[in-house]
Amino acid sequence: MILKTEGISKVFGKLQALLDVDLEVEQGEIFGIAGPNGAGKSTLFNVMAGTFPPTAGSIIFDGRDITALKSHQICRLGLARTFQVPQTFPSLTVYDNIRVGVTFGGGRKRGIRDRIARALDFLDLNSVRDLEASNLDLYTTKLVMMAACLATECRLLMLDEPLAGLSVTEISDFLRVVRHVNRDGGTTVLMIEHILDSLIDISNRILILDNGEVIYNGDPEGIRTDPRVIDVYLGDGQVVLEEDDQ
Ligand SMILES: Nc1ncnc2c1ncn2[C@@H]1O[C@H](COP(=O)(O)OP(=O)(O)OP(=O)(O)O)[C@@H](O)[C@H]1O
């Protein structure tokens, strides 16, 4: 097991954003997280990545308790994340954006040129290496964000709604890249995603949050028929699985 949370709760003022969340991510798998808006998915990511500490509970990464560590310390241990809205410095090149992304907040500088070169190669981004980020489309911007994570040599990659805003073709291309990172790169992937068909397709296991609580944790296909999941997503007997048709 590479990541484990035990009894994670997070309170913002009077709002219980997470309540007693347990999850276990196995080395080498793709683990999906879904749930309606406001369910607590990003909060869970933020807690696991050290953006802020949980109110209660603990997080174990690779056998080590990281609950009280800061995000740059966690990143150095091998856990990297992307954000829902990809953010680049528009006037910097792809290469420099990745370099800034890797070193921001105290990331390891040693061997950085080689690590960036390997990440660009691995994601087939050499042709855009010297382009300014302002010239990139959303799909390529998302790949660049992923390359910045891979250049940290992370062993766990956390993707926060990576398919948002992509066309159907781009979604299938992006999923192919995620599989490549997972299978060929040996990187464990934890992925929040609203597009359930895609998440079912790519994940080994899926956890569903609702109102900060785990309502499902297990086999991806099982979410199609699980009464609590159906209730949360639709309430009339089946889970609607929509593809983005942009
Ligand atoms: N820093 C914060 N301060 C106060 N409340 C917050 C903070 N971050 C999140 N929340 C609240 O916690 C709840 C869970 O939010 P969160 O962003 O984790 O949900 P989510 O499942 O990621 O939703 P979405 O799918 O819309 O991104 C929401 O009610 C949100 O308003």
Image (spheres, grey):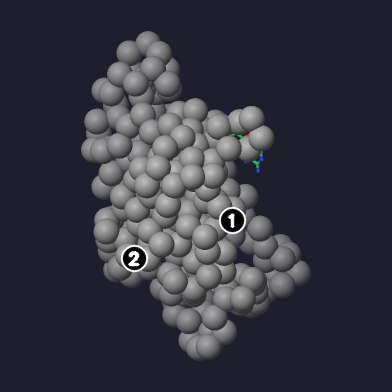
- Please indicate whether residue 59 sits to the left or right of residue 90 in the image: left
Find ligand 1 in the image and state its quadrant. Answer: top right
- Please indicate whether residue 97 sits to the left or right of residue 117 in the image: right
In percent of the image, x 27 and y 59: which residue is there?
Answer: 1
Asked which quadrant contains residue 200, the reply is top left
Can residue 215 be seen by looking at this rendering? yes
**C-alpha gap between disc 2 and disc 1:** 19 Å
Question: What element does badge 1 sit on?
Answer: loop
2 or 1: tag closer to the N-terminus: 1
Q: Disc number at residue 186?
A: none
Residue 98 percent location from the top left of the image:
59, 72
Q: Amino acid at mark 1?
A: Thr
**Label 1, on which residue?**
51
Compared with residue 215, is residue 81 higher up or lower down, i.e. above or below? below
Q: Amino acid at mark 2?
A: Asp
Image quarter hosting the C terminus: top right
In percent of the image, x 57 and y 76: which residue is there?
Answer: 107
In percent of the image, x 42 and y 17: which residue is there?
Answer: 234
- Please indicate whether residue 25 sits to the left or right of residue 119 in the image: left
Can residue 177 be seen by looking at this rendering? no
Residue 75 percent location from the top left of the image:
50, 68
The number of callouts visible is: 2
**Few, some or many residues within 10 Å of mark 1 (<14, 14–19, 20+):** some
**Few, some or many residues within 10 Å of mark 2 (<14, 14–19, 20+):** some
Q: Disc number at residue 62?
A: 2
The one nearer the camera, 197 or 13, is: 13
Residue 239 percent location from the top left of the image:
36, 22
Compared with residue 117, is residue 42 higher up or lower down, i.e. above or below? above
Question: What element does badge 2 sit on?
Answer: loop
In percent of the image, x 44 and y 47: which residue is there?
Answer: 57
The one nearer the camera, 113 or 133, is: 113
